[in-house]
Amino acid sequence: MAEIRDGIDELDRRIVALLGERMRYIEAAARVKQDRDVVRDEWRKADVIDKAAQAAEDHDFPPALVREIYEVLVEGSIAHEFVKFDQLGEAGE
């Protein structure tokens, strides 16, 4: 059982590292967007979630669970991007 838990712990560390890398891209998006109104893009949000659900199917993982996870992930990413966008705007004023 310890070996299984160690494997899960290692995967969790790798997942979090990838999430951190993903967040750096979110921050890059905040730097290139000129208008705060384009931070939230519902079409893009739906597209990201749909692609993740399809990838889940391809990897024998429950797509409904991925949709739930990605709903939280994308909303959190949007919130983070708004914060970064506002910080950049304040720094440039």
Image (spheres, rainbow, N blue to C red):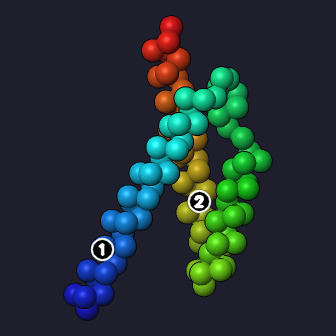
The residue tagged 2 is 70
The residue tagged 1 is 9
Report x, y in % for residue 93: 50, 8
Residue at 49% in and 30% down = 84
Look at the image and tell me whether residue 64 can be seen. Answer: no
Report x, y in % for residue 38: 70, 31
Q: State the image quarter where residue 17 is shown.
A: bottom left
**Mark 1 to mark 2 CA distance (whole Å):** 21 Å
Q: What element carries label 2?
A: helix
Q: What residue type is labelled 1?
A: Asp
Crowd class of label 2 (few under 14; some 14 to 19; many from 20; radius 10 Å) = many
| Depth order, front residue of 32/91 | 32
Residue at 69% in and 50% down = 45
Q: In the image, is 60 to the left or to the right of 88?
A: right
Residue at 25% in and 88% down = 3
Residue at 52% in and 44% down = 25
